[in-house]
Amino acid sequence: MRPRAVVAAFKQQAIHFISDPQWIIPSILSPLLFTAVMLMLYRDLTGPVVLQAVLGGGVLGMWANTLFSSSYSISFDRYNGTLEPLLLSPSEITDIVAGRALWNALIGLSNALLVFLVSELVFHTEVSLLDPVMFFLTLVLTLVSLAVIGILLSTAFVLSRMGSVVASMAEYPIYVLSGALVPITILPSGLQYISYALPPTWGVEAVKLAAVEGYQSMMGADMLVDIAMVILLTVLYFLIARFLLKRIERRILETGSSTVY
């Protein structure tokens, strides 16, 4: 990867985000509203259930920002006529997507922390963290794993004009399958196996273990196993995404077409 290209993409994404206020609604306000609704439903409950509601809003904010940076931004390049110049530039498309993902990872992490702060100040959730340091670290790992899934989805955006449909279809399934919205144990058994293959699932479990004293992992693993799995799967997904993007980039240069309907 070229660090200069990654930094340039990071700056470009920051400028686009700041100059376009419409992204405040899906990236910041929507997760807060979602968390407020969930806490109103669970207002008589405490402990892990309340944490699940707050964590769900935080992960929603991180995932929404990931889709924007790693996927929808490719569609904007296509609409603005800048996709082809990007593909012809010396920088790899992976560098561009990674730089954008870093900015939105920063926004996503800030959003998640904002959800926890507002939940405490407004709804008085009184969620105590067992290990605040590990909670923050596992939250960062979960965010990185979500960003890598977004990079993998970006392959569809580079290759097809219908990529936005793919992202819209993937937004809530990934959110549910990761265990952020509801425990994966209530999902059908077939879907649970899909959840095990997603790195955010292990990240969410690690976050819960770091936050709730006496929490029993639904997958029977301790925190170290959860952290090892989220790192392993994240690296694997990134290597797959990088391989696919390089193959797609080579195909586009060979055929002269970047569109599949």
Image: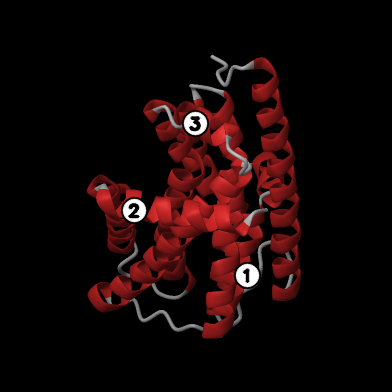
Q: What residue is at 47 percent from the left and 44 percent from the top?
A: 67
- Please state if 127 lies on the left or on the right of 24 as rendered: right
Measured from the top left, where is residue 129 in percent x and y?
49, 83
Q: In terms of sequence position, does the residue under pointer 1 or pointer 2 come before the other?
A: 2
Report the amino acid beneath label 1: Ala
Q: In terms of sequence position, does the residue under pointer 1 or pointer 3 come before the other?
A: 3
Disc nearest the viewer among 1 and 3: 3
Q: Is residue 38 above or below residue 64?
A: below
Q: Nearer the viewer, residue 178 or 38?
A: 178
In contact (CB < 8 Å): disc 1 and disc 2:
no
What residue sits right under mark 2 in the picture?
Answer: 15
- Please state if 187 lies on the left or on the right of 129 as rendered: right
Q: In terms of sequence position, does the residue under pointer 2 or pointer 3 come before the other?
A: 2
Residue 70 seen: yes
Locate residue 31: give its quadrant: bottom left
Q: Is residue 145 above or below residue 208?
A: above
Q: Is residue 32 above or below residue 44?
A: above
What residue sits right under mark 3 in the picture?
Answer: 83
Q: CA distance from mark 1 to mark 3?
A: 38 Å
**Element on which disc 3 rests:** helix
- Please state if 93 lies on the left or on the right of 29 as rendered: right
What residue sits right under mark 1 in the picture?
Answer: 206
Residue 183 seen: no
Q: Residue furthest front?
A: 90
Q: CA distance from mark 2 to mark 3?
A: 18 Å
Measured from the top left, where is residue 219 in percent x and y?
71, 61
Measured from the top left, where is residue 170 in percent x and y?
52, 37
Q: What residue is at 54 percent from the left and 14 percent from the top?
A: 261
Locate residue 243: give its quadrant: top right
**Element on which disc 2 rests:** helix
Report the amino acid beneath label 2: Ile
Measured from the top left, where is residue 104 in percent x and y?
44, 56
